[in-house]
Image: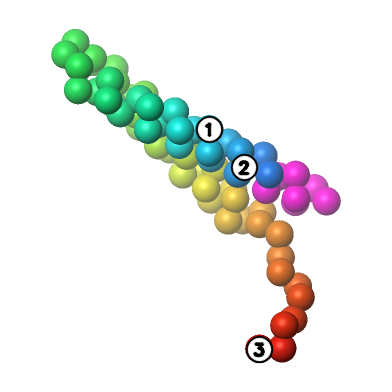
Amino acid sequence: MKQTWLFVVSLAGMAVSAAVLMLYIPSLFRSGEQDGFWTLGVLACLTVTFAVGTRYWRPSTSGSDGG
């Protein structure tokens, strides 16, 4: 049961951080943004971390279909 909650939390975290990352990309093309690359890097690392957590804690498919 704990792995299921960890999977759901990491899936939601990945979705939110990836959405913020996609919304943040257009602001990089504005002039005067110096710290934009650091924010982009942090958001990218956060998204990758949640993606790895999602893969690690995914529920197992223990059903056999016979085929």
Report the disc number at residue 10: 2
The mark that comes first in sequence, 3 or 2, is 2
Where 28 falls versus 59 (above or below)?
above
Front residue of 15/34: it is: 15
Label 1, on which residue?
16
- Residue reaching furthest bottom? 67
Q: Mark 3 packing: few (<14 Cα in 10 Å), some, or many (20+)?
A: few
Where 49 falls versus 32 (above or below)?
below
Assign a secondary structure to mark 1.
helix
**Residue at horizontal 71 percent and vertical 59 percent from the top:** 59
Front residue of 54/27: it is: 27
> Residue 7 vs residue 39: left or right?
right
Indicate yes or no whether the magenta region holds residue 52: no
**Can residue 66 be seen from the camera position used here?**
yes
The mark that comes first in sequence, 1 or 2, is 2
Q: Amino acid at mark 2?
A: Ser
**Can residue 42 be seen from the camera position used here?**
no
SS majority, magenta: helix
> Which of label 3 and label 2 is nearer to you?
3
**Residue at horizontal 30 percent and vertical 28 percent from the top:** 25
> Residue 32 vs residue 55: left or right?
left
Label 3, on which residue?
67
Where 40 falls versus 60 (above or below)?
above
Q: Mark 1 packing: few (<14 Cα in 10 Å), some, or many (20+)?
A: some
Where's residue 49, x and y in %?
51, 43
Q: Which residues are magenta?
A: 1-7
State which quadrant residue 12 falls in: top right
Q: CA–CA distance between discs 3 and 2?
A: 31 Å
State which quadrant residue 19 falls in: top left
